[in-house]
Image: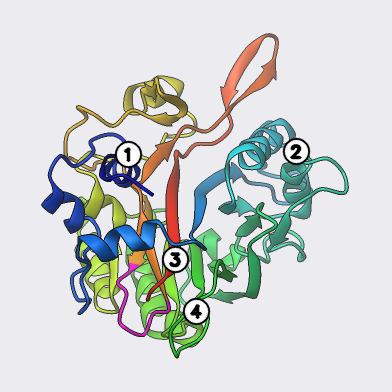
Amino acid sequence: MTSLQDLARFMDPLDPPTSLSALVDMHRWHSRADEPGIARMLRRHDHPKRVDIRLLWQNTFLLSSGFGIGDKPDLGPRAKAIGTLIRDRYDVAALAELFTDSERNGLLSAWPRGQRPRAFGMGPGAMESSGLLTVVNNPNLQVTRSAEAEFENEAGEDALADKGVRFIEIFAGPGTTHMGDGRIEIFSTHLQSGGHRDVALAQVREFVNKIFPYFHRPENAAILVGDFNIRPGNPEFPQAKSALESIGFRDLWETRSNTRGDTDLGERDLALTNSICPLDPADPTLCREHGLGPRNSRRIDYAWVLEPTNEVAITIDFSRPRRVRPPDYARGGGKVGLSSDHLGLELLIRVAASR
């Protein structure tokens, strides 16, 4: 049986809640009618068919035109370094900026031949897929739906990338309500870049008004991850946040962490990376978050979680989200480089039946 101390460390390994009321509050959502009491909270963590899923969001910086024009450097070794991280640590990885099958296969080459994970987003050549790829590395997770939707609102060079949203639905365990078996919907996106934040905001509204209603089923939990190219200090952020909150999404970082959450590394600036992502000595894959303050000046990568309703057939609890340092790779000449210009986001998700 899970102890209250173990449960507190799961919910926030950096700053575990020290009171029972604080622990219960971490399990409450703003609008759910059947907010958990202590017994219910413990039951769902001790559910016999509980499933823990470790999810990565990562903008990979593996930009390639497919024609050798404007390609970012060291694509092969960087792709394999990111693939190795996913292979060794994650059940699911939602990725961006993998525009060609060459880079996608380079990432998947981290697995032995014949043991590669399922990858959703393989197929079209350069600049036709929004650069989004979702890798499912856990063979026990069943993918029951997969699709991609392109944004109508586009501008500049990004219009060539056919940016949009990648969607997968994962069956993680049996629900027990009359709604049937609940699943987790994972939406990933990479919004407009190049300073066109008005277009990025329009794409958020497109997700809210068209894409999400088309794919979402009320018995499912839902997560949206992505590079929004909008910082919390930008004037467009409150509007984007309001649009997502209007359909029940909440910013998980803002909800569960009081640190600044920087993710933009400025073209793999090593000094900046060491400044905004001091390594956690307990887990050097992750950034240390203590003492960094509440300001969010360079946060452009987000995880949004849909508030559950009584129709949802599963419970879904989140450990405190963490930032992930992109793995180093050998650049040649004895030098080491960063594999991406973004920090990743790690979500540890606990899933059980809702009743």
Q: CA distance from mark 2 to mark 3?
A: 31 Å
Residue 184 appears in view:
yes
Q: Residue furthest right?
A: 114
* Mark 3 element type: strand
Q: Give the image quarter of residue 79.
A: top right
Give the label, 3 or 1, closer to the camera.
3
Label 1 sits on residue: 262
Q: Residue furthest bottom?
A: 178
Label 3 sits on residue: 352
Give the label, 4 or 3, closer to the camera.
3
Q: Residues within 10 Å of mark 4 (few under 14, many from 20)?
A: few
The type of residue carrying mark 1 is: Asp
In this rendering, position of residue 134 left or right of residue 56? right
Q: Earlier in the sequence, mark 2 or mark 3?
A: 2
Tell me where residue 172 appears, x and y as whole percent: 56, 66
* Mark 1 element type: loop
| Residue 175 lies within the magenta run | no
Cβ–Cβ below 8 Å for labels 4 and 3?
Answer: no
Residue numbers of the magenta segment: 306-313
Q: Earlier in the sequence, mark 2 or mark 1?
A: 2
* Mark 2 element type: loop
Camera-side residue of 218 and 77: 218
Give the label, 2 or 1, closer to the camera.
2
Residue 152: mark in rendering: 4
The type of residue carrying mark 3 is: Ala
Label 2 sits on residue: 110
Tell me where residue 319 appears, x and y as whole percent: 35, 48
Camera-side residue of 112 and 329: 112
Tell me where residue 292 appears, x and y as whole percent: 22, 30
| Residue at position x 37%, y 63% in the image | 44
| Residue 309 lies within the magenta run | yes
